[in-house]
Amino acid sequence: MTRAEVRETHMTSPTTEDDAVPPATGAPGESPDGTGSAGLQVGARHRIADRVFRTLSVGSGLLVSVVIGLIAVFLLAQAVPSLLDNEENFFTYTGDWVTTGDRLAFGIPQLFYATVVVSVIALMLAMPVSLGISIFLTEYAPKRLVGPISYTVDLLAAVPSIVYGLWGILVLGPAMVPVNEWLVGHLGFLPFFQEPTQVANMSTGGTLLTAGIVLAVMILPIITAVTREVFMQTPKGHREAALALGATKFEVVKLAVLPFGFSGYISGCMLGLGRALGETMALLLIISTAGPMDFDLMESGETFATKIANNAAEFDSPAKTGAYISAGLTLFVLTFVVNAAARAVVAGKK
Amino acid sequence: MTVATSPHAADPVKKPSGFAPMARRRRVADHVVRIAVVLALLVALVPLVWLVSTLVIRGIEPLLDIDWWTLPERSGGAANAIVGTLIQTALAAAISIPLGIFVAIYLVEYATAKSWLAKITTFMVDILSGVPSIVAALFVYAVWRTTLGLPRSGFVVAIALVLLMVPLVVRATEEMLKIVPQDLREASYALGIPKWKTIVRIVLPTALSGIVTGVMLAIARVMGESAPVLILVGSTRAMNWNPFDGNQESLPLMMVQQYNNGPGALDRVWGAALCLVILVALVYFGAKLVARLFAPKSS
């Protein structure tokens, strides 16, 4: 069969579908013709398949949007009646929660305080360290070390938080006891290290400080993973331009890497902060009792997440559930603002 | 000026290249930063090595006993918790992986830039990805228990895990589909291949390694999630293969229960912790392996 003949059968096949099969079988090695005519024969089936696939995709998008929208509506619908029945101000009431009976009384300042204090400690400790590791990994580390260290960092980001919590209360807490005593003894004049009202905190190490350190260890791999990823994408040209001007390694970092990757670093930190704010299990093991709001890091405290988890077993009435859902919604708004800030930083860079 | 520079000019040995020596300040700064970043690494390594070594040293003993892997808690093992963790994670994965991948396909392949549905979907997925696990669990509790009055079970945990997993799958898949070259799609269309087949046979296989990695990492993330099991399922010391009925233990739940039992049970707590980390690590390294196997062949 010559090329001209092949072209001819190919051109005629669309018009006469019945004749399309023999040339396809009679031309071994000319597969484009075979598939071409076969595709046209089953066109109707493909059109249906196309429509089904499209419907599945669009449907999934629609389903997810609707479900999440319903979640929001549902949570608000649960929270609003309890908020309306609340006899105290939701944002200023600091007493014990009353969630049974006709008179409801609940407020979030203490939860907000503990959540923010613990997260801020974690962020203050983890931010410089993860920046240092990222710079080390992208600029200073010997090539053969980068792989294993990055692997380890990623794996640590996947370690369940309950394991960090267990380590915090059973290992780090007891180890912190002498440190706590030294801090109270020598720096007790600072508001951060006063003698706590609950002395038990000191002997178990279950303090806001310990909780902050554990959170820092937890979010360190998360921040580092993001930051390293961004730093590695620094354009080679920027780096070489700096080197050509005689820059030292530090100056390369200062002139090329940081200007390019700083927004990525900040958004990584925000991601870590988001994780820290919503952290439940690790904190539930370390700090579980409520504490005063006096910026004393030797005290215990209750965060949004631990308060909900602590009381979840006793949700029996809609009013009670509503009160805790209100707290959950506040936590959600908090994390959403932080995540939105992270996205804005990244978007602003682009 | 001439007095100051002439000694240098007269001494060619000191600067053979003609360049001035580096200023002391710059040299010191470089050294200080080098030491600082190495210190940062060491500071980070201390707690992490401490954590991992404690975990292994204290947790390895119960795991070496074959009973741990074969008998339920009632008989001195942890098989019921391992089975529970695997079943709940698998259920969550079975729902969220197809759903998440289809959402990502919609966002990348079908949605146009102006589509309002695409904008809403992206926004909703963003919202969902920021939901703390305890809030997701609280929501499922409020629907399932408070509103519908249905009993707690392993399946309810899986629902909460789906909420946490879907955004992870969508994000990972979306990123991967976006970097599939447009040329591949156009080449396929030019051959007359319908769109769905282009997606299934060309786009997805090209992005497969990245998608699989993202999905596996999402599985690793939800596997150790402890907030939902705390409020959505009851604890039991017996084996339960049925996630739709009755209490079902999982490793995080077992850790909490045993921890509350007091110091005598701490060995088992550490054992469960190590067991959980091993499962997560297996999934994680499985992801890396699969990524390597599926990586597009570079010819």
Image (cartoon, helix red, strand yellow):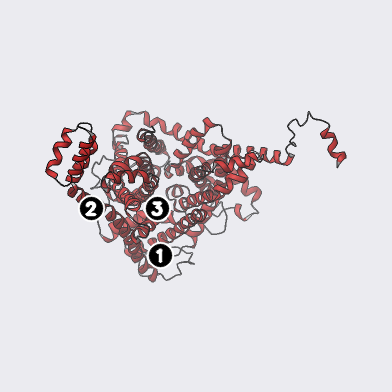
Camera sees residue B257: no
Circle 1/circle 3 CB separation < 8 Å: no
Hey, which residue is sitting farthest right in the picture?
Answer: B3
**Distance CA(mark 1)–CA(mark 2):** 55 Å
Q: Nearer the viewer, mark 1 or mark 3?
A: 3
Q: Which residue is mark 2?
A: A51
Circle 1/circle 2 CB separation < 8 Å: no
Q: Amino acid at mark 1?
A: Val
Left or right relative to B280: residue A23: left
Q: Which residue is mark 1?
A: A98
Are there few (<14), some (14-19), or many (20+) residues within 10 Å of tag 1?
some
The answer as to whether the residues below labels 1 and 3 share one chain is no
| Subunit that carries the residue with mark 2 | A
Left or right relative to A249: residue B262: left
Vertical placement of residue B221 versus A307, above or below: above
Q: Nearer the viewer, mark 1 or mark 2?
A: 2
Q: Which residue is mark 3?
A: B129
Q: Residue A86 or B132: which is nearer the viewer?
A: B132
Instruction: Give the image location of residue A75, x and y in percent.
Output: 35, 62
